[in-house]
């Protein structure tokens, strides 16, 4: 089953799995889907370890990282700021 997202992400199946568990991320990517690691709970050091582990277990398949970008504190609450 191919779809445009498969071509865009370089995956076999249109299956995206968001997880905080590196094992799930790696398993989904190895199976032909797109595993995505939720990274908001990690420090820079733990994130580096988790990504290294995933790199070592996805057999070169693509995966993603879900991060949150905080609002710019210097303009928080101001109107008409773009």
Image: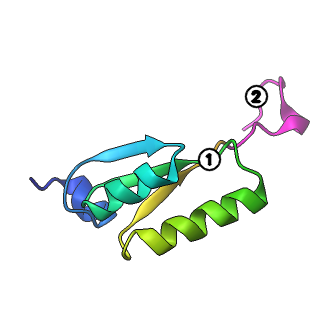
Residue ID for mark 2: 80
Q: Are marks 1 and 2 in contact (CB under 8 Å)?
A: no
Q: Nearer the viewer, mark 1 or mark 2?
A: 1
Task: Say which of 7 and 25 sits in front.
Answer: 25
Quadrant containing the C terminus is top right
Question: Picture coordinates of residue 81 (x, y %)?
Answer: 77, 34
Question: Mark 1 or 2 closer to N-term?
Answer: 1
Whether residue 38 sits left or right of residue 13 in the image: it is right
How far is disc 1 from disc 2 in space, using C-alphas?
Answer: 26 Å
Q: Nearer the viewer, residue 44 or 75?
A: 44
Disc 1 crowd rating (10 Å Cα; few below 14, some 14-19, many 20+) is: few
Q: Secondary structure at mark 2?
A: loop
Q: Could you tell me residue 20's position as x and y percent?
A: 54, 43
Q: Is residue 39 above or below residue 45?
A: above
Disc 1: which residue: 67
> 59 above or below 65?
below
Question: Residue 31, located in which quarter of the rendered image?
Answer: bottom left
């Amino acid at each position: 089953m191919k779809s445009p997202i498969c071509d865009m992400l370089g995956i076999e199946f249109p299956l995206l799995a968001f997880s905080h568990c590196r094992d799930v991320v790696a398993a989904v990517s190895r199976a032909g889907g797109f595993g995505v690691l939720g990274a908001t709970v990690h420090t820079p050091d733990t994130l580096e370890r988790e990504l290294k582990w995933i790199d070592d277990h996805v057999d070169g398949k693509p995966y993603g990282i879900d991060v949150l970008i905080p609002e710019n504190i210097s303009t928080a609450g101001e109107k008409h700021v773009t």
